[in-house]
Amino acid sequence: MCASSRRILGSFPPVSTGGDFPLPGRHPARRAADQRPGCIVAETFSWPQEHLLNCSLPAPGLFLLSLTNPCAQRSTASRRTLESSQKSWEENINHWQSKTIYSPMLFCITTLPPPVLLSTLLLQHSIPTGADHAKSKGSARVKAYYPTYNHVGQPPSKIDWDAYTDVLFFMVIPEANFTLSFDPVLTPSQGEDLVTEFVAQARKHDVNPVLSTGGWTGSRHFSNLTATSSSRERFAQVLVQFAKKHGFHGIEIDWEYPNSDGIGCNSRNKNDVVNFGLFTKELRTLWPEIELTAAVTLEGLVGSDGKSATKHETALLSENLDFVNLMAYDVYGPWSDTTGPLAPLLATCAPASAAQSVETGLQVALKQGFKASQVLLGIPGYANRFQLISPELVPKTVDKQITLYYQNKTKVTPRGGRFDDKPGHDVCGQPQAWGGSFLVRELVRRGWLSKDQKHGLNGYTRYFDECSGEPFLTNGKYLISYDDEDSTIAKAKFAKEKNMGGIYFFDTMGPTKNTLSEARKIFSE
């Protein structure tokens, strides 16, 4: 088929992507942009065969190569003679796709000799957007967060760019006065320089740069900023202007958490989820082509009654978001009463108070109105270390399954690795202790885990817990919960089998190169 998975549009003049010739699979919120005369927004799709007028070129002739996109603010044009001969459209597609043109505008090749038969070839080669980029590297996304607060440990040039389809610049912080700030470790000028370098590196490696805002320490003002129509409009303008100015492909809202406890001093409103949806609608209106993402927990969004949000409350979110990042980690941590899996795939042996898992998180997202194809499965690139009270592991039996994961631990969290949270005070002014976290790469570098991640070393023993699908290391004094290559592959396979939108890692510093490579393979098979 001449149009299978190609950015091709067979049409009668005048060229239109709306009205009687709607693009298949278009996001409903983007159709308003499509209706503008001559406005074309490129996406990857399979065009029904019956809509194509002709899959062959007419006799050789002069073609106009127009680099004009009515949706863009600027345009240019050039003429080129193309010897078509007996070339099929497929051959010409390959010809033009082989040309690297560093411009974000669209290409339209139009036959001119009468009778006028318009067959439009849409290409967007240098900066892929939306589904285009995902298709170019496989149908699913493999994303990761880039932690700007650790930029010294990993400058943008050191990111494993080839492992990802998208990388999120984490983070910019929305302030109460409708401005954006960088992480406190960065001065404004350092932040601007880092953004510029990050986006340049992303484009160099053909990866989508995404602006992430919020996070655990940066969600204090979301509720107030989205509370009214005027505040939503103003906040949306600030975000869109910043993202466009720096060349970002999309925006991710990491609000932790709407109408729910976060770090402890966040503004909060019982209507946060509905207001969040209205805010995404505002973003979509300002920037119709934006790729828009939000982060959600395994427990899902909290509605106005304090219970799980209804589909009615999440309707605008599911309609306007391209993806939701399922934060399928931090089920157990320093705050927990016992040790336990950091990011369980399953919750077979878990106590009722901590029965969250990848499996239950997806179920909640679907129940709240999101499609599986919108949900990206989050995988941690870090590990949590607990200090045990006893070196002897006490087994726990649940439904005839035995687990060793749940052990008594001390209340004191032991110091973690180089990039662990440091003692001090958080943004709310509350005391903060060590976080007890390590990068998974650090476990290998320190000689506690073998390079193939199959064995513990130097006094550590590796266990794999069938109840949770999660490994752990222990040396009798400490227990370390983490995701290794095997558990990551299992999660990638789960995402693929459930038709999820893909996976992402938190963050770019943690996973080993081989783990990233094996995870990508799952979606290319």
Image (cartoon, rainbow, N blue to C red):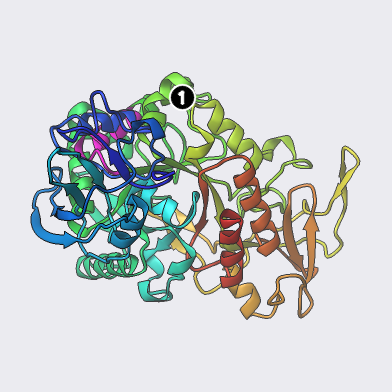
- Residue kind at label 1, given as amino acid type: Gly
Q: Is residue 275 above or below residue 393?
A: above
Tell me: 110 left or right of 215. left
Camera-side residue of 232 and 373: 373
Camera-side residue of 379 and 30: 30
Q: Is residue 19 above or below residue 172?
A: above
192 in magenta: no
Q: Main secondary structure of the magenta part?
A: helix
Question: Residue 411 location in percent, x, y?
Answer: 66, 56
Residue 48 shows in the view:
no
The quarter of the displayed image where residue 265 is located: top left
For the C terminus, give its image quadrant: bottom right
For the N terminus, give its image quadrant: top left
Residue drawn at 13 percent across, 45 percent down: 113
Q: Residues within 10 Å of mark 1 (few under 14, many from 20)?
A: many
Question: Residue 99 location in percent, x, y?
Answer: 27, 65
Q: Is residue 522 above or below residue 476?
A: above
Residue holding disc 1: 303
282 in magenta: yes
Question: Residue 123 location in percent, x, y?
Answer: 28, 52
Residue 331 shows in the view:
yes
The quarter of the displayed image where residue 114 is located: top left
Tell me: 295 left or right of 204. right
Q: Which residues are magenta?
A: 275-290
Tell me: 274 left or right of 110. right
Residue drawn at 42 percent across, 22 percent down: 313
Q: Residue furthest right?
A: 400
Camera-side residue of 49 and 41: 49
